Amino acid sequence: MKITAIIPAAGDGERFGEKKQLKLLNGRPLIFHTIQPFVKSELINEIIVVVPKDNVNQLSRDFKSTITSKKIEVVEGGETRQQSVYNGLRISDEESKLICVHDGVRPFVTLALIEKVIKASMEHDGAILAAPSTDTIKKVMGDQILETLPRQTIWRAQTPQVFSKPALKEAIQIAIDEKLEGTDEASILEKIGYQIGFVEGSSLNIKITTKEDWIFAKAIYNELND
Ligand code: C5P
């Protein structure tokens, strides 16, 4: 079965202050670290990296010159993450049955985690990685707490998130038409009634969002590559 990995990495880094997907970690742009396990996985047939317009040509050349063992495409992103994923979806191999979406700024995903979530997706309409919450989560409004959510029911969504290609296409199309914006792909499939499973990810599979996250990223990288 053909599986396409779509790596949205077209954010403008507003919260971070620069395009963090291109920031050097041990001398290499972060996005190169992120795609490594996808290059290695024998389950993945092609990788589509979605990047800012200004970086398409350069990154396309860089990826194609360094990655020769797998088909890799680079495409321009959209206004939102959802649109970026859709741009990737549009150029995916016609024969792909599953789409594996992974944040370009989660560089510590492993081959084992990718393959675990792909296997889990086959038992549902799709599956994601998630990690149990160690914090107690409060629902708030303004400066007041409305309620405390039972911690044992709270899991933090990670990526990869893997779905059947027609289901993901349908969900994003509906979200675009109805102007719904999901912060992940699973949320829009859930909303239209698809049954999405989850398997435990890793607390090392962090998403680099803020400057503080860069401190964790360097520490994790150093620990894993000691
Ligand atoms: O905004 P968020 O932190 O959820 O971004 C997750 C991933 O989506 C990042 O890798 C970012 O580059 C990507 N993204 C994108 N297109 C956008 C916005 C974000 O590909 N328009």
Image: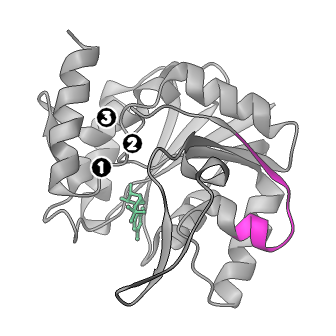
Residue 136: mark: none
- Ligand 1 neighbours mark 2 (CB distance < 8 Å): yes
Q: Quadrant of ligand 1?
A: bottom left
Pinpoint residue 214: horizontal percent, then vertical percent: 18, 44
Pinpoint residue 122: horizontal percent, then vertical percent: 84, 36
| The furthest residue to the top | 226
Reading the image, the residue beneath label 1 is: 208
Pinpoint residue 201: horizontal percent, then vertical percent: 56, 34
State the separation of the CA atoms marked 2 and 3: 11 Å
Element type where label 3 sits in the image: helix
* In this view, 85 is above or below 162: below
2 and 1 marks in contact (CB < 8 Å): yes
Q: Nearer the viewer, residue 172 or 222?
A: 222
Amino acid residing under circle 3: Phe
Element type where label 2 sits in the image: loop
Reading the image, the residue beneath label 3 is: 32
Question: Within the magenta stretch, is there residue 26?
Answer: no
Pinpoint residue 50: horizontal percent, then vertical percent: 43, 56
Location of the C terminus (image quadrant):
top left
Residue located at (34% from left, 46% from top): 60
Earlier sequence position, callout 3 versus callout 1:
3
Q: Which residues are magenta?
A: 188-198
